[in-house]
Image (cartoon, rainbow, N blue to C red):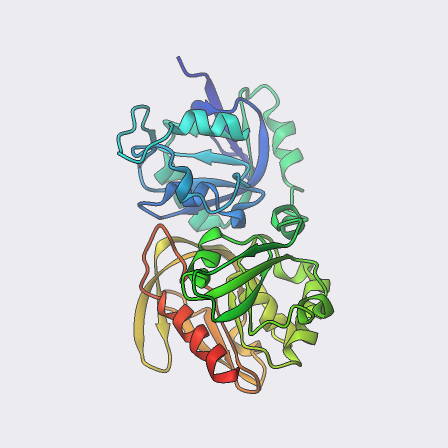
Amino acid sequence: MSRTAYLILENGKYFEGKAFGAEKETTGELVFTTAMTGYLETLTDPSYYGQVVIQTFPLIGNYGVIPSDFESESPALKAYIVRNWCQAPSNFRCEGDLDTFLKSAGIPGLYDIDTRALTRIVREFGVMNCKLTYTLDNLDKDVEEIKPYKVTEAVSSTSTKDKQVFKAEKPEREVVLIDYGAKHNIGRELVKRGCNLTVVPYNTSAEEILSLDPDGIMLSNGPGDPQENTEAIEQLKKLCEKKIPTFGICLGHQLLALSQGAKTEKLHYGHRGANQPAKEIKTDRVFITSQNHGYAVINDSVPDNAEVSFVNGNDGTCEGVTYKDMPAFSVQFHPEACGGPKDTAFLFDRFIEMIDENK
């Protein structure tokens, strides 16, 4: 029989549920994702570092655990909250169950909880801190203790520690991927397009990257507040001076914009899910995209040497920037989305064309 567990919010509200996964108390930033599939990609997305994730889709775990679908070596989130946890998964690729996976990764879970009501609170009041615990005996004390929590050292905690090299079958280009907390599928998309890929840590200097003589530079996704990465932003300024074709995704998009003088802001509750509309301004076409971010580039702050290329169809926030004085562009959403949708995977082809035109 599952143990009773509680989720305490910093506004004093609490929810009762049942525990699964690792049995431990934890504090984190409460966010939700509306993705209906791809829970394994969600669990292993480094961009959820320091966060407690609510899945709004009610049934999670039904196709089990499939390691080849992972986006990183291990989860970076603090806890996982679902409505119904499937204890008998069924899929021909299944290699395990969700409870066992969470236990092995040290991630606590909470199920049989009203995720709809919980999500409505986050939508109304915004992202807030929370604590997963097994008692309400110290409720007032817990509320006060979780208020100061902040996600820090996110990029340094999720980036690769060592340089990695991945070879294409028929290599035609050399690309350096700066890992700010990268999802695996970014690398896969580049390698299958004929790119030898060198993945470097977030704190690699511009000089070290240039010594690799790359044809293109890929800036990965990642967690946390983009403005905290001051040294990474300084290195990007130096790289941009060399006019090397550059493509940024999510955090990489934000860091590139910051390096050129733009500003970022924290969103009320962010965009997390697989059904976010992004409108390409040039074509007036809307794409359904996968997204996972709590910060955005401020439209009006985009410098004169750039222009906003995509906007969110719901709130008009910046979803992409194209630069006029260098071969570079970036997007806030995830064109590599392995859990889907894959509507914007063509942006990798656009990057390849940019590389080839500048060789």
Q: Is residue 161 visible?
A: yes
Answer above or below: position of 163 versus 37. below
The answer to whether residue 16 is visible is no
**Corner quadrant of residue 175:** bottom right
Q: Position of residue 255 (x, y in %)?
A: 60, 66
Q: Is residue 177 left or right of residue 85?
A: right
Which quarter of the figure has residue 290? Answer: bottom left
Front residue of this view, candidates 304 and 329:
329
- The x and y percentages for residue 346 are 36, 69
Which quadrant holds the N terminus? top left
Front position in the image: 146 or 187: 187
Q: Is residue 355 depicted above or below 274 in this figure?
A: below
Q: Nearer the viewer, residue 108 or 343?
A: 343
Instruction: Determine the residue positioned at 66% across, 62% down.
Output: 227
Q: How many marks?
A: 0
What residue is rendered at 44% in x and 43% in y? 70
Which one is nearer the viewer's eye here, 9 or 71? 71
| Left or right: 300 in relation to 99 | right
156 relative position to 304: left or right: right
Q: Residue furthest front?
A: 170
Instruction: Give coordinates of residue 333: x percent, y percent.
Output: 43, 62
Residue 266 x, y percent position in the rendering: 56, 59
What residue do we see at 47% from left, 80% from top?
356
Q: Is residue 135 above or below residue 231?
A: above
